[in-house]
Image: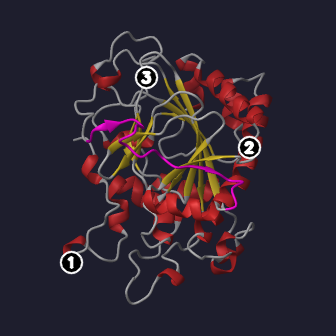
Amino acid sequence: MTSRLSEAFRAHPVHLHHGDLDLESVREVPDSHAWPQLDDYPSVHSSFDVESVPVIDLSDPNAVKLVGHACKTWGVFQVTNHGIPMRLLEDVESHGRRLFALPPQQKLKAARLPDGISGYGLARISSFFPKLMWSEGFTIVGSPIEHARQLWPQDHTRFCDVMEEYGKCMKQLARKLFWLMLGSLGINKDDINWASPQGGESGAMCAALQLNSYPACPDPTRAMGLAAHTDSTLLTVLYQNSTSGLQVLRDGAGWVTVPPLPGALVVNVGDLLHILSNGIFPSVLHRAVVNRTRHRLSVAYLYGPPTNAQISPLSSLVDPNHPPLYRPVTWAEYLGTKAKHFNKALSSVRLCSPLNGFVDLNDHNRVEVS
């Protein structure tokens, strides 16, 4: 998978200067990280006046229906009884915190290359914004051993074992969620030949693990943890533990905080599932804000199709009254498109141009900071 996905990143290298700034130690937000506008939409928290992000028990007999409704109306939901052991979630968080607690120069030994996927570094989307984000990340595609050896020359085995176990468990869960989502639309496993465990002729399903660190910030009103974006995936599964920070954009309500629930996981629709569903499932715009007193760590599992599989609106969702909205695109091609156009990527592969009277309701470029 790494070699196939890397082609998209090699075509669009990102040169980001990590610098020597240690966010854990600064006492005020430097100009390089000071965002001028964080109130593009109002921020709200769950209350009697604001509907909250759906929480779904995967053992519920109505889980398919509940998942489908959440995908159509929110594009995001939380799941409980998902089968991932709490012990494993705690181990992943512990090793993530151990990684980000390393000295800056030690972490940079495992730095991600400008045209690479895996390793330590700033968010690739940073290149689209004039200010830096109050976060750092570590991406794992395939085995983490090469970069882990750079971080802990003599003590990397346990980190690798935990991350590989987490990846295997998440792959099973993501596959289950994927078919719950499509099952709510009446899609079965015979309708998509590339989505078998082996992936057919296109190869196996692909995934990446993303660890994100958001240090406590002296002035959260002037900093952004991770800027507003959608995911270039089928779906993303996020563990955010007990510290809030994730917000999703809700029409008519603004930015809604997704409250952390003990042991729960957040699931959101990605751009490719939006395309597959012919626009029925919105690819939710989301961001991460920072906390004044608490260091937040999140772990995202990014689930995608085989890199060479053609992703297009499913034929059973297309008819004369519902024409296909998007042209076929592979994940590798779409990653390149996203790297070039960012939040306008979906519009760039849309068949019905806004100039012809159609508006892409999932085009979120309007919230970019300029």
Kindly report the distance in space between the C-alpha atoms of the residues bearing marks 1 and 3.
Answer: 44 Å
Question: Residue 146, image x and y in percent?
Answer: 70, 37
Taking the image as shown, residue 242 lies to the left or right of residue 174, namely left
Does 51 lie within the magenta span? yes
Q: Is residue 346 above or below residue 240?
A: below
Q: Which residues are magenta?
A: 41-61
Compare residues 230 and 1 and report the one nearer the observer: 230
- Quarter of the image containing the N terminus? bottom right
What kind of element bears circle 1? helix
**Which residue is more in the foreground, 46 or 162?**
46
Give neighbour class at mark 3: few <14, some 14-19, many 20+ (Cα, 10 Å): many
Say what amino acid the circle numbered 1 marks.
Answer: Asn
- Residue type at mark 3: give it: Asn
Question: Gap between marks 1 and 2, in whole Å?
Answer: 47 Å
Instruction: Find disc 3 in the rendering and name its residue.
Output: 291
Q: Earlier in the sequence, mark 1 or mark 3?
A: 3
| First in sequence: mark 1 vs mark 2 | 2
What is the x, y in percent for residue 74?
44, 55
Q: Which residue is mark 1?
A: 356
Residue 12 on image: x %, y % = 42, 52
Residue labelled with disc 2: 84
Tell me the quarter of the image containing the C terminus.
Answer: top left
Indicate whether 73 appears above or below 43.
below
Q: Give the residue type that dot 2 points to.
A: Ile
Residue 112 left/right relative to 145? left
Q: Secondary structure at mark 2?
A: loop
- Magenta stretch, main secondary structure, is loop
